[in-house]
Amino acid sequence: MIIRRVADDAARQACFDIRRAVFIDEQQIPEAEEWDTHDATCVHYLAEDDAGPAGTARLIARGNSAKIGRVAVLKPHRGSGLGARIMRAVMDDAKLQGFTQAELEAQVYAVAFYERLGFVAEGPDFDDGSGILHRVMRATL
C-alpha cells in the first residue's frame, strides 16, 4: 500500500470517490455538508495498492497547525491498520512541512482511535452539521 500526496486530477477524483462512498453513501452525510471550498486548496492524500484506491485524508494549513480531516477507508480495507498508516503519513508530512501541531474533528466513535495516535480530546461533543457528533482533538507533532 502506498500513501502519497495527490498531484493530479485523477488521484484527487479517487479521493473524492472514497469520501462519497464512506461519508455520503454509508454514513448518509448530506452531500452539501461533505464538499467545501477547502477541497480546492488543501493537500489531499491517497492510499492505494495494485488493486486501486483504498483510503484518503486531507490537510488544511492553519498557521502552525495542520487540520487533518476527511479521513476515510473503504470497507474492504478496514481493520487492516490502514487508517492509522494514513494518519501517520499525513502527520509525518505535516511535520516535514513545518507544522508543530495537528488538529482534527473526530467523529465521537473514533476518539479512541485518534487517542492511540497521540491526539487529546478537548471541549464538548458537537454536531458539525452532518448530524454526527464530533469532538475536537489536538496532537503535538
Image (cartoon, rainbow, N blue to C red):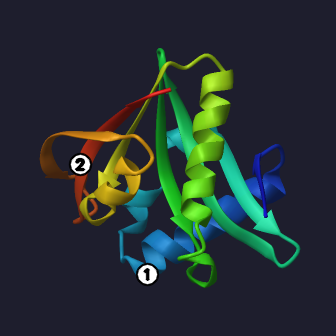
Look at the image and tell me whether residue 94 can be seen. yes
Identity of the residue furthest to the right in this view: 50
What is the x, y in percent for residue 40? Answer: 62, 40
Q: For residue 15, which numbered disc appears in the image?
A: none
> Image quarter for residue 78?
bottom right
Query: What residue does disc 1 label?
Result: 26
* Amino acid on which the number 2 mark rests in the picture: Arg
Task: Tell me which residue sits at (72%, 64%) in the image.
Answer: 14
Look at the image and tell me whether residue 41 can be seen. no
Q: Secondary structure at mark 1?
A: helix
* Amino acid on which the number 1 mark rests in the picture: Glu
* Mark whose residue sits in front, 2 or 1: 2
3 and 69: which is toward the camera: 3
What is the x, y in percent for residue 64? Answer: 48, 15
Task: Tell me which residue sits at (80%, 52%) in the image.
Answer: 9
Decide: is 23 above or below 125: below
Task: Tell me which residue sits at (77%, 65%) in the image.
Answer: 48
Query: What residue does disc 2 label?
Result: 135
Task: Tell me which residue sits at (33%, 46%) in the image.
Answer: 105
What is the x, y in percent for residue 70? Answer: 49, 54
Q: Is residue 72 left or right of residue 108?
A: right
